Image (cartoon, helix red, strand yellow):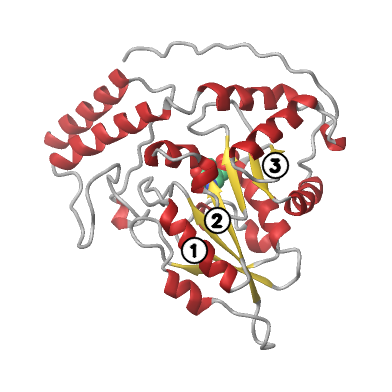
Amino acid sequence: MPSQEMRQCSVTAPLGDDVFSEDPTVNELQRQTADMFRKEDALWLPSGTMANLCAIQAHCHERASEIIVGKESHLTLWEGGNLSTIAAVHPRQIMEDPFGKLDLEEVRNVWRSDNDDHFAKTSLVCIENSHNMMGGSVLDKKYIDELGKLASELSIKVHIDGARIFNASVSLNIPVGELCQSADSVSICFAKGLGAPMGSIIVGSKEFIRLARRARKRMGGGTRQVGVVAAMGKYALDNNIERLALDHQRAKYMAKTLYEAGFYQPQEGDDDYGVLVGYGYSKGGRLFRACTHLDVTEDEVRHVTETLLSVARS
Ligand SMILES: *Cc1c(COP(=O)(O)O)cnc(C)c1O
């Protein structure tokens, strides 16, 4: 295996106390991200899990809130049950289709207002873009806009878990501001495809960010001279978005090669292979997940693909 080349970059970061919103580097990153997403404001957070958690607490500050969320979503599966144990919301889980979409009729059907004492009141619907467990599938603007329209009809909010929203945006060739226009909030990870060492951010209205900032402090996520880390997020935004197309090319090459070798048995209703090597984490233990990113070269992807093929043949 070729060894990875060390990626090096240097950034400078004037610092202040971010607990008092006085770190200029954090403020600059928040302004830049809010502008990119065409939202009023943004808030830096240490991790994607905390970003989602604070976003949900901000949307659901009313007690006995219910949120509609996908059964296979990161929120449901991989965030330690924090929706119920920390945010104290009731997660109403519905099954995504194989492409990560929540069925709009089902959202309408499970929605509940507070007109019955038996009910928790629905406050929020959450989607994930791109959708991790659904093979990295991408939700397009048309679907998000339709969901947004339904949500405003039902007087609920829309949150996008957009840990990899820039992958979706590059793949659809549409700016994030347009793609997420109908969402009230988006959480974004700098430390996934964008390649920064750490950090996440949420965007939304001024009032949403004010409430999320309070939640962040309660969670112990208020940090001080954190511009040193925010500067890396800013570097990622400035340098690492367009190149995501390379990761997609490599993932598609791997998926296509394995698919054509019989790795993936298509199910009724499937579209094309795309990057969908498999979906659903159960699948009788047959699923494996591969993820390309900026530290994985084309040669390495080829090497892994060929190794898998030769193991499968033997
Ligand atoms: C990684 C990820 C998160 C959580 O991010 P952490 O920084 O690992 O806490 C949330 N949602 C999705 C879809 C993710 O892929």
Pointer 2 with pointer 1, Cβ within 8 A: yes
Q: Quadrant of residue 269?
A: bottom left
Question: Within 10 Å of the Cα at label 1, are there few (<14), some (14-19), or many (20+) other Cα atoms?
Answer: many
Between the C-alphas of marks 2 and 1, the distance is 8 Å
Instruction: Check disc 2 and report the residue beneath it.
Output: 182
Q: Is residue 157 left or right of residue 298?
A: right
Q: Nearer the viewer, residue 221 or 310?
A: 221
Q: Earlier in the sequence, mark 2 or mark 3?
A: 3
Tell me the residue that label 1 is attached to: 147
Residue sitting nearer the eye, 42 or 19 = 42
Residue drawn at x 24%, y 29% as measured from the top left: 305
Q: CA distance from mark 1 to mark 3?
A: 23 Å
Residue 217 position in % (x across, y down): 81, 46
* Residue at disc 2, CB closer than 8 Å to ligand 1: no
Q: Position of residue 102 (x, y in %)?
A: 43, 64
* Label pair 1/3, CB-CB below 8 angstroms: no
Instruction: Indicate the quadrant where residue 306 lies.
Output: top left
Q: Is residue 254 left or right of residue 87?
A: left
Residue at image point 55% right, 43% down? 177
- What secondary structure is marked by label 2? loop
Observer able to see residue 86: no
Ligand 1's quadrant: top right
* Residue type, mark 2 in image: Ser
Identified by mark 1, the residue type is Leu
Q: Is residue 152 above or below residue 129?
A: below
Badge 3 amino acid: Ala
Mark 3 neighbour class, 10 Å CA radius: few under 14, some 14 to 19, many 20 or more: many
* Residue at (19% x, 44% y) in the render: 263
Rendered location of residue 191, percent (x, y) = 56, 32
Q: Is residue 305 above or below residue 14?
A: below
17 is higher (above) or lower (below) than 181: above
Determine which of the numbered discs, if any, sits on residue 42 in the image: 3
